Amino acid sequence: MSDTAAKREPGAQREVSMEKIVSLAKRRGFVFQSSEIYGGQSGAWDYGPMGVELKNRIARVWWKEMTQLHDDIVGLDAAILMHPRTWEASGHVENFTDPLVDCKKCKQRFRADMIDEAKLAKKECPECGGELTDTRKFNLMFKTNIGPVDDGGGLIYLRPETAQGIYVNYKNIVQSNRMKIPFGIAQIGKAFRNEIVTKNFIFRTCEFEQMEMQYFVKPGDDDRFFAYWREQRWNYFSKLGVKMEKLRWHQHGPGELAHYAKDAYDIEYEFPMGWKELEGVHNRSNYDLTRHQEFSGKDLQYIDQDNGNERYIPFIIETSAGLTRQLLMVLCDAYDEEKVADKGTEDDWRTVMRFHPNVAPVTVAVLPLMKKDGLAELAQGIRQGLKEDFSTDYDQAGAIGRRYRRQDEIGTPFCVTIDYQTKEDGTVTLRFRDSMEQVRVHKDELEASLRKAIKDYTRA
């Protein structure tokens, strides 16, 4: 099962399904069902050792893209709990609803806008054919109580989005950081939505993480910056190493636009269950700051000192993405089953996650060919030298081919094998995940070789 003996057939691949993604995610420690020993909690998921590393790396790529590479964008970490008036001003109390119907026979619950119009008109359940209830509005915000007494006076909401924390801090950031329009505020944080239906693994959940950036511009400049941020967000995905042909734009029609939006586009990805929204770019006009000024009684106008102290409420261009949804996209995009031999057995195929090295949970695995004769100790020494700059793994159990396959399944881009030749001349075998090519590299040049391979990486 060694790579050197493998007979590869480029193009021989199997179809990706959500069932395969879910199976691998649990088997290799990416995602677990929340509270699984109690039967699981619907709409909630736990991220295992590989999953949390992948999630954190995607977040770092996004954060670097927004704040490090843009001089006019700063960061924020706002509280999850906010004054209840925030959500009245934002329109969430009144408008953040989904149409809900129940089946009187099978007791299942559905979003009315997700049911075939003909069935909905006849009040026919799409699952069992039973009778549906009348459609009613269902608010998606989680309510809780703050304070020692639950008397209704301490009503508070778990935030359904991170954007409002940016809006209520906009004036603080302008004053404390001397920001000049145009500028942006970026935030990564948890959000909560009491979804009627949670499905498709981690695609739609009740608890999730958002990556949002709100860009404040002068009225009249909004169309130009809206086009600019559409281009910027599209280019970002090429840096994640995903297949760009699986992305497309969808513009919101008149019936789709949110109550705050002047214009809106979604970047959609072709998941195994079809084309679904991945990220939104929205022209929110001056709706949000106008509403918060009205409800708070505070002056949220921007004073343009470079233009005669002109006063105005900025327009906002929003880029809004789900971190956990991007993780699912990266999992689906990276998953591959490749035929590498022709023996007529299941071992002819390898499962490989083709993550970009910048987001892979493990960058390099160090593998001693044998546990004896000092190879394990030599391998541990090499791993210690790499730990400072790379995420590493160490595996000495089983045949080397089996170990390569385990690393392929968690998407490790590079494997370093220490063998008896290493003891003689100091060279190691550097194995590349995507091509399975193996080259000899001196251990003193290993770090430089890995850095170059990461910098030059392109998905085949």
Image: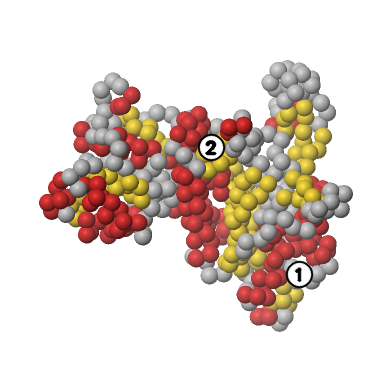
- The image shows residue 168 at horizontal and vertical percentages of 73, 64
- Are the residues at dot 2 and dot 1 in contact (C-beta closer than 8 Å)? no
Q: Residues within 10 Å of mark 1 (few under 14, many from 20)?
A: many
Pick the front one: 79 or 165? 79
Q: Which residue in the rendered view is the most extreme toward the left?
A: 424
Asked if residue 219 can be seen in this view, the reply is no
Residue at point 17% right, 50% down?
422
Q: Residues within 10 Å of mark 2 (few under 14, many from 20)?
A: many
- Determine whether the residue tagged by mark 1 lies in a helix, strand or loop: loop
Residue 333 position in % (x across, y down): 46, 40
Q: Is residue 147 above or below residue 143?
A: below
Instruction: Give the quadrant of residue 229.
Output: bottom right
Residue at 33% from the left image edge and 49% from the top image edge = 364
Residue matched to label 1: 300
For the N terminus, the image quarter is: top left
Q: Residue at x 64, y 44 (%)?
A: 207
> Which residue lies at the image location 67% right of the left edge and 73% below the top edge?
174
Alpha-carbon span between mark 2 and mark 1: 44 Å
Give the residue type at disc 1.
Leu
Secondary element type, mark 2 = strand
Q: For residue 374, say whether it is visible.
A: yes
Position of the C terminus, as image quadrant, is: top left
Compared to residue 158, the image places residue 3 above or below, namely above
Number of the label disc, if any, that sits on residue 63: none
Colour style of the rendered protein structure = secondary structure
Q: Nearer the viewer, residue 268 or 83?
A: 83
The residue carrying mark 2 is 32
Residue 152 x %, y %: 86, 49
In the shown orientation, is residue 434 left or right of residue 70?
left
- Check the image and report above or below for 222 versus 200: below
Amino acid tagged 2: Phe
> Where's residue 337, x and y in %?
38, 32
